[in-house]
Structure formats: structure tokens, C-alpha cells
Amino acid sequence: MNNHSIAAMITVMLKELRDLFRDKRTIRIALIMGPLFGPLLMLGVLSLGQNRVSSQLEKPLELPVVGAQYAPNLVAWLGGQNVDILPAPADADAAIRGQDRDVILSIGKDFPESWRSGMPAKVEIIHDTSRQDAAIPVERVEDLLRAYGTTVGSLRLVARGVSPTVATPVIIAHRDLATPESKRGLTLFFLPYMLILSGFLGGAHLVIDATAGERERQSLEPLLATPSARAAIMSGKIAAACLFGMLSLVLTLTVFKISFTLAPQTVVKFDLSLLTMSKLLLVLVPVVVLGTTLLTLIAASAKSVKEAQGYMNLLLLMPLIPTMVLMINPIKNQLWQFAVPFLSQNQLIMKLLRMEFVSASEWGVYLLAGFGLGAVLWWIAARLYHHERLAISA
């Protein structure tokens, strides 16, 4: 670009930002409600989940027992392990299906005979695996029954003059190399999607209004009729959207930092340092460029603001796909992944949250691919801005 084009781009950029900041309602939503909503929503969900897990682990476990008379010693032992033994319901299956109970223990009539003969005595845990809220009670019952079986088995060996260690030929020990930062990163697995989405669509309102909106208001044609190059005009609009998107990201990360610092230790608490925030912003810059250039393409191709906004539902899914794939099928980091849009940002953000080292080659591939794709989309958008039909309102 020559000096005239650069000056035109800066003029258009300042004009778009000035017009945007005149809309007080939009600014309140984009720069106050948006940055506040994401962090508060995440911390609220984590807090609710942590409280639910804590309450289910600490409070007495209510356990209806069918056939309690067949194993009185087992029932009595469970009663001393923070378990409230309840009478059996009339229909155990119906009680589980109706969500009246999370888990029911059933002891069959053949339990006493198998027990006296020294054979494995069968008990049945009745539950519904499709109900996530029942997972912890079922696991507690399984752990208790396993502990009871181990204790009784050891006592039987001792009674026969055999050391219980004979039945344990292998001892499994764990050496966990996970750092506190990596464990916190596992808790915040959904944070990359929120940051990527915030950067990807941070300038959406400005981009759509500056192209499709101005075309509907018939204010785009006079702007394109000026001596300034159309590529410079388009670049000014994209630059304004990028600056606004980065401002929204800075506010979002600042709120996250404050929220993580003030959050209870039992939920999630760590110091998001300024260095980490700077690296996160560097990761998200290509996302902002990609989002604004892609939205410029859509707004320039759409016949109206409503049509351009209709594509937003599809764009919302694009950053979500890598997050869902990694949740279902986690993969190890490989260099080629840092060239894939959205997947690369997801992997980099998680590495930064886990305080892991990002190599120079990974940064290089990511920045080259990210800004390269943004440049290609910018070039396509610039070509669209040269079409005469762009200034014509549908």
C-alpha cells in the first residue's frame, strides 16, 4: 500500500470505531456483558459441579437394600461406613427408572449358601448408567463392597493359616507426574472454546454493520465512490473490527484473571500471569483476523443484514468442533496440528494453561498458517469489494 492508501485505511478505521462507540447499547453488551458473562458462567458451572460432587461424597449414602436379611453382617458393616440402610422399595426397577433412588443393592436368596461354602457370593447393584447424577453413589457402593470383600477374604486366609499377601502377588503403585497447572488445565477444558469464540466473533457486529448494514442504509456507495482504493476502505473496516475484537479479548482475559484469583480454592484458583495473558492474546490474534476477514466475505456476499446474521449460527459451530473432538478422542500434540484452524488454537491455549513449553517451531507453524489464511481471506474480500454490485442495496 502507498501512503494515500494507508491514510485512507486509518481514516476508515477511525470512522468505523467512532460510529460503533456512538451505539452505547452495543458497547455495553459487547464490552461489559460479553466479557463478564463467559467467566462468570464457567466459574458458576465449575462451582455447581464441585458442590454436587462434594455433597455426594461427604453426606451419608442412602442405600435401599433388597434381601437385607440374607446378609446381615454385610448390611451392618455398610451401616458403619456412612451409609443409611433403607427398606427395600416395592419395585426396585421402578424406583430407579422413576428416579426415586440413585442406586439399590440387591442380595439374592443364594447368598447365605455361597457365603458358608466359601464360594463367591453374588450381590447386584441396580442403577441407571444414563443418569450422570447417579455415577458417584454407584461408585461409592462398588468401592465399599470391594473393600468388604477384600477384608473378609484376608480374614479367611488368616483363619486357614495363610498370609493374606499370598493373594496379592502384584502391588500396583502410581507415580503421577501431573503438575498442579496441568490438573487445572484439565478442569478448564472448555475455556479454549470460549476464548476462541470470543475472538472469532468479537468484531461480528461491526463487520456486518460496516458492510451489509451500510449497503442497506445506502451509505456504502458514496464511500466507495471516493478516490480511495477499495482495498484500503475494506482494510480500514477490518482493522477497526480487529481492534474492537482485541479490546473485547483483553477485557475477557482480565475478568478471567480476577475471577480465578478470587475463586474458592475448591473450585479453581490459579494466577493467570501477565506473561500467560500476553501469550494467549498472541494465540488469539490470528483468530480475530480470521473471524473478521471471513465475516467481511459473508457480509459482502449477503444481500441483507438478516442474511449475514443467519450465517452466524454456522460460524458458532466452527470453533466448537475441535473442542468436542478432543473431548471424545484426545490426541497427542503433533506439529501439523498447529496449522489447522481452531484445532491449533485449542492445543496452544491448553498448553499455556498447563504451563507447558511451546517450541519455536510450533509458534512458527501456527503464526504462519494463521496469518497466511487471514491474508488469503483478505485478498478474496478485497476482490469482492471491487464488484459494482456490492454498493447496490437488494
Image (cartoon, rainbow, N blue to C red):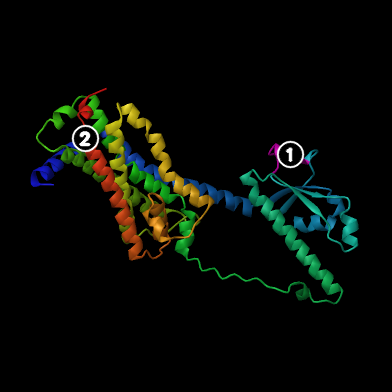
Q: Depth check: 125 or 361 in front? A: 361
Magenta span of residues = 92-101
**Callout 2: few (<14), some (14-19), or many (20+) C-alpha neighbours within 10 Å?**
many
Q: In this rendering, does residue 147 appear at all?
A: yes
* Residue 84 appears left or right of 275: right
The C terminus sits in image quarter: top left
**Callout 1: few (<14), some (14-19), or many (20+) C-alpha neighbours within 10 Å?**
some
Element carrying mark 1: helix
**Residue name at image x 15 percent, y 32 percent:** 224
Q: Amino acid at mark 2?
A: Tyr
Label disc, if present, on residue 95 of the rendered structure: 1
The residue singled out by tag 2 in the image is 385
* Residue 323 appears left or right of 290: right
**Residue name at image x 68 percent, y 55 percent:** 140
Q: Hey, which residue is sitting farthest top in the picture?
A: 394
Q: Amino acid at mark 1?
A: Ala
Judge whether 295 appears above or below 272 on screen: above
Judge whether 47 appears above or below 16 on screen: below
Element carrying mark 2: loop
